């Protein structure tokens, strides 16, 4: 069993000034402690989270610390299972973008494609755009 974690949750849990910080932080702690199966991310989710952290904080060092946390570098535990975004996943992501008329971002379409390929049914996310595709676990419910 696994749950994929949306980049917005990772960013919000990391940045104290982020909207929903406390909710995201609490939910992420529960999920990374194994409460919902293997906590899972991908390269595109990593990119989304780090870019949001840098953009919203205005400090590249904030993104660097988040990157270290997600990769389990230095003093941080290696907590995440990583899924590789392969060319077939990109193909499926582009098809999903076309099917949904752009209702999903490319990162979110890639997340759905990865979940379909790896049999993951749940996503930890604030984003209701996932609802037609995955069982979304809202951080406030964790």
Image: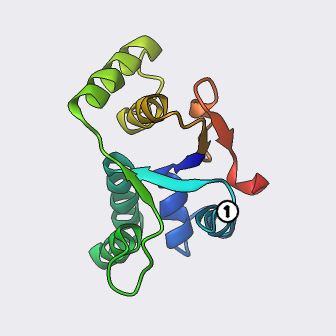
**Residue displayed at 57% across by 31% down:** 129
**Residue displayed at 40% across by 58% down:** 49
Q: Nearer the viewer, residue 41 or 117?
A: 117
- Residue, far left: 87
Locate residue 95: give its quadrant: top left
Q: Is residue 99 left or right of residue 47?
A: right
Locate residue 13: give its quadrant: bottom right
Spot occupied by residue 45 in the image (x, y as percentages of width and height): 39, 50
Q: Is residue 134 above or below residue 61?
A: above
Residue bearing mark 1? 27
Spot occupied by residue 16 in the image (x, y as percentages of width and height): 55, 75
Spot occupied by residue 5 in the image (x, y as percentages of width and height): 52, 51
Looking at the rendered structure, the number of numbered marks drawn on it comes to 1
**Visual colour scheme:** rainbow
Spot occupied by residue 27 in the image (x, y as percentages of width and height): 67, 62
Quarter of the picture containing the C terminus is bottom right
- Residue, far front: 1
State the SS at label 1: helix
Q: Is residue 104 above or below residue 99?
A: below
**Residue displayed at 45% across by 62% down:** 80
Q: Is residue 24 left or right of residue 71?
A: right
**Residue displayed at 40% across by 19% down:** 96
Q: Nearer the viewer, residue 61 or 120?
A: 120
Q: Is residue 21 left or right of residue 118?
A: right
- Residue, far top: 99
Q: Is residue 5 left or right of residue 44?
A: right
Category of crowding for the residue at label 1, using alpha-carbon neighbours closer than 10 angstroms: few (below 14), some (14–19), many (at least 20)? many
Q: Is residue 90 above or below residue 2?
A: above
- Residue, far bottom: 75
């Amino acid at each position: 069993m696994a749950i994929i974690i949306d980049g917005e949750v990772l960013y919000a849990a990391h940045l104290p000034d982020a909207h929903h910080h406390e909710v995201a932080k609490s939910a992420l702690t529960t999920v990374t402690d194994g409460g919902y199966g293997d906590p899972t991310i991908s390269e595109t989710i990593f990119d989304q989270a780090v870019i949001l952290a840098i953009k919203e904080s205005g400090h590249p060092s904030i993104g660097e610390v988040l990157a270290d946390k997600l990769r389990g570098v230095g003093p941080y535990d290696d907590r995440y299972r990583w899924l590789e975004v392969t060319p077939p996943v990109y193909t499926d992501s582009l098809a999903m973008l076309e099917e949904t008329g752009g209702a999903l971002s490319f990162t979110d379409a890639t997340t759905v494609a990865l979940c379909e390929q790896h049999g993951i049914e749940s996503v930890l996310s604030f984003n209701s755009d996932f609802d037609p595709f995955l069982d979304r676990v809202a951080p406030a419910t964790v």
